[in-house]
Image: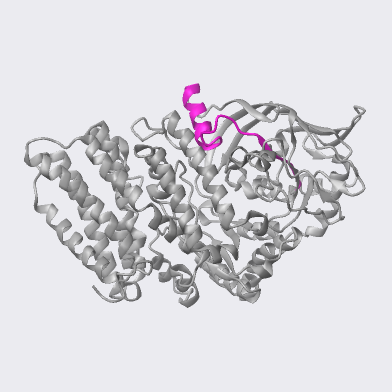
Amino acid sequence: MSEELYYEFTTDSEMIGERYQLAVSRIKEIKNENLGRPEFDEYFRTVSGFIEMMDDTLKWSIDGGLEKDSMEELGKRNKALYEDILPEHYDSSFGNPEVAVQKLGEDFGKILSSLYFEIRSMIPSAFEHNLFDMVIRAELFLEVYGAFASSCEAGKLPEYEAIRQIMYWFYSDYAEEERCIRFAQMVAPESDFARDIIMKSDLTDLRYLYKFGEYITDNELKTAEHLNTLSQEEIDKLATTYTEGYRIGFAMTGKDITIKKTAAIVYELGFERIVKKAVSNFKEIGLQSSIYRANMSVFTMLGSARRSGYTGAVPNKQFDYDHKDDDALYLDGALVTRRLEAMRAAGEKYKKEAKVFGGPAVIETFGEKPFAPVPKKDAVHYSDTQKKLLSDFKIQNSLIMNEYIIGKERSFTIIAFPVPEIGPNFPEIFNEVVKINTLDYKLYQNIQQKIIDALDEAVYVEVKGMNGNRTDMKVMLHELKDKAHETNFENCVADVNIPVGEVFTSPVLKGTNGTLHVSGVYLEGLFFKNLEITFEDGCIKDYNCSNFESDEENKKYISDNILFNHKTLPIGEFAIGTNTTAYQIARDYSIADKLPILIAEKTGPHFAVGDTCYSHEEDNITYNPDGKSIIARDNEISLNRKTDPDKAYFSCHTDITIPYDELGEIRAVKENGEGIVIISNGEFVLPGTEELNIPIKG
């Protein structure tokens, strides 16, 4: 192997090269072998053929194919990498658990489909020339194949448990290496695969998009094309809005950005012109940018199909959803302990780098065709015991992470833009979103202060729906002992959450009761129809929706994707969104169902279930622009951090928004029972807030 094929986290790269060559040579022989079981021959030939394709991709990349090939050739090669799992071919793919179970039987079908899912994570490794990631998966495949070959030679299949143990020990043995690699990519970006592509490529030559090894569609190509029509001045303005939000986020919370050295840029491909300028902007304020890939592997899925890191298009969201629980094939207490040890080892190894990591700067996208997953009985699912193990792991993992990346010292920012799939009005919608993202924050700051002043007179707030919305909530507020200097609500403008437009608090749980209902809402890209959640003393008591025919399926859908398998969650946030401009633009272009939560949460009141907005930062005293300190940073559950941290956090926070056209009333109720109406029949009626109604009425 060429000297270019070294693995920077491995001290003995020559050994990795030798292992890789041996593994690939053996895999190439499989297509000519016969196990005597046609269904398993088909599987192993399919997967070995895919690994051969990865080897070919690696060599083609090293030989400069990315620079030599035409757009058409690059597009064909890119599609070939992902073709087997695309929706049009998924009904015949071993990546589909239903297909694998039908052909290979229930036990072997599920675990071998999971193995194929893991093997497919080799695609980006081939582009990164990352032999370590490739060889450990090739060796895993060979070990499983070897078990089948030796058993079939004796006229039988291997024991299922023997195959499960092979894969179990793979995920245990490499837990530390995998965790260290991913952690380093975030906090120690001395060499950065994606950043080098962005900063060194000619971004007017769209062939650069294929260098990442991600799936490329018209969304990525046309987004990049559109950005290339903008002047550098326009690009600079967009990038500066984004990076200034990050900087201001530190300033507004009294955190010292000068002690930080790294910011992580998280985005979807196509926005490289903005990212390139953002890298320069961050450098000017002393921050190096890390740009790490979303890693789709059983090592990282852990019950969620959400991608964290930079990514291209998702080839098939159903494929990701089908495999999000594959970890249930292996998860036990020992593996949880091993993973927590791996997180600790990664933190210790990169302790200095983690200390100066500032947090993520995220560019979200929206506008793709909404995805409603199909639950499959043949997909792997967690047992109740495993759900508890997984939720405990996530809590412990976040606590360990917070020891190294200290929450009260870090910040973040998020901004969102549409992609071309949103429809033929994409250029106009893009321009309108730019308008939303650059609204006059001073105007909103002043209006929102009037709302906060009214809310600070109240002991609780009533929220009621209309037009079929069954919401009827009573939200208890913290007691203000010094109203001249204290407040319950944060005046949120365009800093960490761009665009402007909300006031929010962490409510008191005791006495916070009622029903939250929305006729339809998208949360993390998943649609929930008639979502209804009942709260008692601020915690979820019951829930349902009407996505599926049975209550059992509906409740499982909510448990998996909102409660994240916790038995209950508290209300961590109550907020009133004020960005009526965003609301009206969504209606004008019929894109309300496509808005990301980042914008949607500003278009009406919302409740977040899970951790508070101040998770791991409760001891940081923050102030509104009027100088008042925000005291509502804890609730009765997060206060456990002082005595029993394991019971204080849930490692999730999901916003659920009621749109204005389903909102009957928001009323702040004083101690004497007198009410101050903030919103009535979907419009702001509090004196001094009427200007917010202009976009709706206009």
Q: Is residue 342 left or right of residue 657?
A: left
Magenta stretch encompasses residue 557: yes
Q: Nearer the viewer, residue 450 or 456?
A: 456
In the rendered image of this protein, does residue 386 appear above or below residue 183?
Answer: above
Q: Is residue 394 left or right of residue 300?
A: right
**Residue placed at 33% from the left, 32% from the top?**
378
In the rendered image of this protein, does residue 267 appear above or below residue 376?
Answer: below
Q: Is residue 647 left or right of residue 40?
A: right
Count the numbered circles shown. Answer: 0
Query: Residue 377, position in %: x, y?
Result: 36, 30
Q: Nearer the viewer, residue 329 or 544?
A: 329
In the rendered image of this protein, does residue 591 appear above or below residue 257?
Answer: above
Applied colour scheme? one colour
Q: Nearer the viewer, residue 69 or 447?
A: 447
- Residue 451 found in image quarter: top right
Query: Residue 636, position in %: x, y?
Result: 71, 35
Quadrant where the N terminus lies? bottom left
Query: Residue 581, position in %: x, y?
Result: 73, 51
Q: What's the magenta region?
A: 549-578
**Residue placed at 58% from the left, 67% from the top?**
262
Magenta stretch encompasses residue 37: no
Q: Nearer the viewer, residue 402 or 201?
A: 402
Residue 626 shows up from this direction: yes
- Residue 439 found in image quarter: bottom right
Query: Residue 44, position in %: x, y?
Result: 19, 47
Residue 310 shows up from this direction: no
